[in-house]
Image (cartoon, rainbow, N blue to C red):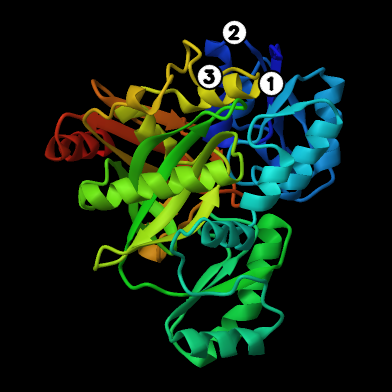
Amino acid sequence: MQKFKKVLAANRGEIAIRIFRACRDLGLSTVAMFSSEDTLCLFRTEADESYLIGENMSPLGAYLDIPSIIALAKRRRVDAIHPGYGFLSENANFARACEQAGIKFIGPPSHILEKMGDKLNAKSIAIECGVPTIPGTSTPLKNADEALNKALSYGLPVILKAAAGGGGRGMRRCDTPEEVKTAFDLVQSEAKKAFGSDEIFIEKFLVEPKHIEIQILADEHGNIVHLGERDCSLQRRYQKVVEFAPAFSVPYETRQKLYDDAVKIAKSVGYVNAGTIEFLVDNSGSHYFIEMNPRIQVEHTITELVTGVDLVRAQILIAEGNKLSHPDIGLSSQEDVQLRGFAIQCRVTTEDPANGFAPDTGQITAYRSGGGFGVRLDGGNAVTGAIISPYYDSLLVKVSTLDNTFAGVCRKSLRAIN
């Protein structure tokens, strides 16, 4: 078992601040890294130490520069690196570089990331486990002609998706044969830019399904529990906008099947740390595995609210070698997971409604936040005077609320947002 002293957050914005808070709760020192474009951002001031990374690289490239990140971690004698979400969080090469440098990667080990971080590999594993999957390719597409042939065999509409990532990036719905050929190059380009890999695949597109994800937590000793589900069906351009827990609109029996299948998949690969297994549930109640995100999710806050489990703190403790039964995690068995109340997460972003909700930039001249009982704010750069650049995600703050009833939590969310 390894007791950490210093943790580097290989990320930016609100998730970096979230990591620093969890570390501070555990008495750990923290290190931030930031690009030139993030020099004035709030998150870098929230760590005990803060260093410029990727000085001569692009805004995104700075956060993807594995050699520089490892060099910084070694120079500052960091024990562990938390990748957050996005960027390198699902990159097996990054996890492997940490392992080779003697630095703990706070997440699954590299060999599991290779299996589950790649969406095609994860789909094959689900099939081996007997879990239903959506009709689609199990290997990367070679070219637009192959994509079109597959689309016609599955029946339109279809969706082209990046194999190496998620979060709504590198995804295009195609309703006509012409759209398939046009979208192929676009999705490849988006995938390469966002995840460093241009491998894409194609699936049958289900119209208006429920998007349900199951939160998994597993330690290095073979213990695995699920922490219920989140309903992430409300999306715009394949980006989640509002999430809530529990997913009461899905029948209890169906949710039990999702729990069982999620745990089955996690156990089959010997999964370790926090992860989310995502399903689509169609109008008939049939469910289909779509992917696993082997990392913390943006919307993890609502699971924390309804379960009382600090997922990021649990990630750190698990990476140290602790069991789920550790007092600061408190999950000796599945029966210890108790869901209470209803939670909603909404995202406050710098987007222009008059311009198709395109990301907006500039300086925040005034900012007033919600608050009060049952309101949780996870902010990134949401402060008066902050400069919002065009280079990164438009998320300013996540507003998560908890109440005893769904109607109550809706009212509380509206109050906090207003």
Instruction: Give the residue pinned by disc 1.
Output: 7
The crowd level at tag 1 (other Cα within 10 Å; few <14, some 14-19, many 20+) is many
- Disc on the earlier residue, 1 or 3: 1
Secondary structure at numbered mark 2: loop
The percent position of residue 79, horizontal first and vertical second, equals: 75, 19
Residue found at x 36% / y 50% = 258
Closer to the camera, 358 or 116? 116
Nearer the observer, 287 or 385: 287
For the residues labelled 1 and 2, say whether their Cβ atoms are less than 8 Å apart: no
Rendered residue at 63%/59% (across/down): 121
State whether residue 204 is above or below residue 6. below
Q: Give me the disc on residue 21.
A: 3
Residue 391 visible in this rendered orientation of the protein? no
- If you read the primary sequence from the N terminus, does the residue marked by circle 1 or circle 2 appear first? 1
Tell me which amino acid carries mark 1.
Val
Bin the neighbour count of mark 2 within 10 Å (Cα to Cα): few under 14, some 14-19, many 20 and up: few
**Along the line of sight, which residue is nearer the eye, 337 or 190?**
337
